[in-house]
Amino acid sequence: MGNLRRAELAGNLAVVRERIGAACVAADRDPASVTIVAITKTRPASDVALLADLGIRHVGENRDQEAREKAADCAGLGLTWHFVGQLQRNKAASVARYADIVESVDRPTLVAALDRGAEQSGRRLGVCVQVDLDETAPAPAGTGPGRGGARPAEVLGLADQVTASGSLDLLGVMAVAPLGADPRAAFDRLTGIHEQVLAQHPGASMRSAGMSGDFEPAIAAGATHIRLGSALLGHREPLK
Ligand SMILES: *Cc1c(COP(=O)(O)O)cnc(C)c1O
């Protein structure tokens, strides 16, 4: 079982690395400038361990309880844990205990809660501001989880708040391309927003963009981190 699964994951990873290589040639980029974050939601800790053995160093999860248990099961593998899901404020302290990077920070109350949680745990926490690239259906500001990112006009203020926090490090920005839109155009908008952030915070160089269906256009648009679930692990059962 374990050997079959290992071979399957190794094959998927080889295909993904080929595609990253080709996208980097087309974009005149060094493949080493693109980090794979394996999104292991719904997958067992044994898959995480196999991926770690195959050279994956970054993993991402989107639900607190599942992530917390898996991070505990996989302690000692030297992995960097990303939290990429919509996060409720009352889960922030829990996430701050095991996550290394929270990519989905999109509102001031969440920045404050993560900062408090990190301080209580005596840890530093890396943070990306998640940007809502959907231009068609703007959600009202401050409506909290579910909207998937801060409006572009809110991003600089959140970035400033993160850098002013005692226990948080601003790493960069993250986005999901809106469904049904041209991903390249959306990722180019993210690039423009990221450049504004970089002008104020030159160290915040992380640009997390692209998933299994759109990582090539994300690489073309300068993504430093691509978040891959199904391309690496196969198709997920829908969440019940
Ligand atoms: C699930 C998820 C991914 C990975 O999705 P795939 O299409 O399976 O690659 C990436 N980013 C976020 C925020 C996710 O929730």
Image (cartoon, grey):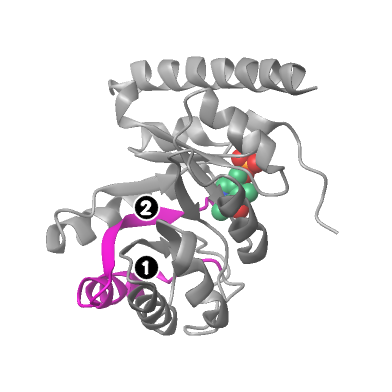
Res 44 seen here: yes
The span picked out in magenta is 148-177
Q: Is residue 168 magenta?
A: yes
Q: Residues within 10 Å of mark 1 (few under 14, many from 20)?
A: some
Which residue: 46% across, 59% down?
Answer: 99
Which residue: 86% across, 59% down?
Answer: 240
Q: Which residue in the protein does label 1 denote? A: 152
Q: Amino acid at mark 1?
A: Pro
Q: Which residue in the protein does label 2 denote? A: 189
Work out whether 127 lies above or below 76. Answer: below
In the structure shown, which secondary structural element does the residue marked by tag 2 occupy? helix
Depth check: give the residue in front, 181 or 218: 218
Which residue: 46% across, 54% down?
Answer: 175
User: Residue 27 in the image: x percent, y percent?
Assistant: 33, 24
In the structure shown, which secondary structural element does the residue marked by tag 1 occupy? helix
Q: Earlier in the sequence, mark 1 or mark 2?
A: 1
Mark 2 close to ligand 1, CB under 8 Å: no
From the viewer's perspective, tell me whether residue 123 is left or right of residue 147: left
User: Residue 216 in the image: x percent, y percent?
Assistant: 48, 30
**Quadrant position of the N terminus in the picture:** top right
Q: CA distance from mark 1 to mark 2?
A: 9 Å
Res 180 seen here: no
Depth check: give the residue in front, 95 or 69: 69
Mark 1 touches mark 2? (CB < 8 Å): yes
